[in-house]
Image (cartoon, helix red, strand yellow):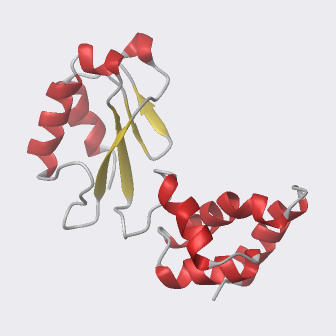
Amino acid sequence: MLSKEEIRSIDHEIALVPVRRAACIEALKIVQHHRGWISDESLHAIAAHMEMSAEELDSVATFYNLIFRKPVGRNIILLCDSISCYVMGYEKIYEHLQTLLHIKFGETTPDYRFTLLPNPCLGSCDHAPTLMINQDTYRDLTNEKLDDILKEYK
């Protein structure tokens, strides 16, 4: 079941597009913002509100890498694995993250503090390697910088 606030926000997005289902990505993002991820129950509720089948909406949800269909950590780390970041030291940063957090791509720390995901491009090729944590972008990374950065996220 969707909350009144979620419905209000989704209906606002629906009003901005000519076809109701065109707002389905925004609807997924709204519910994810409130709940942290899109459970099967949430997906069915959104689909009903959007007048779509759950299968149609799930195909949209699973296409986008920032719609989470399983629980994730409080802090989402997106590590850029583009060619620029790769050439500039992505592998060392990834190895260091694995050592510090004891997780690989697609995994979440046992305390739900971090989820680590690859990202094909963060748009900072001139400052590679780059990662994002939630909405914060960090460029020109080194392992030492990474140590300090991670301390900021609880």
Q: Residue at x 29, y 55 (%)?
A: 114
The number of callouts visible is: 0
The x and y percentages for residue 18 are 91, 57
Left or right, 144 with reference to 73: left
Q: Image quadrant for the N terminus?
A: bottom right
Q: Residue at x 38, y 61 (%)?
A: 74
The x and y percentages for residue 35 are 52, 73
Residue 149 sits in quarter:
top left
Residue 22 sits in quarter:
bottom right
Vertical placement of 100 versus 23: above or below?
A: above
- 107 or 147: nearer the eye? 107
Q: Residue at x 68, y 65 (%)?
A: 27
Left or right, 50 with reference to 109: right
The x and y percentages for residue 72 are 36, 64
Vertical placement of 135 versus 27: above or below?
A: above
Q: Is residue 88 visible?
A: no
Q: Is residue 90 visible?
A: yes
Which residue is the extreme one toward the bottom?
Answer: 1
The x and y percentages for residue 154 are 32, 56
Left or right, 105 with reference to 117: left
Vertical placement of 68 versus 149: above or below?
A: below
Left or right, 22 with reference to 133: right
Vertical placement of 133 versus 46: above or below?
A: above
Q: Residue at x 80, y 74 (%)?
A: 8
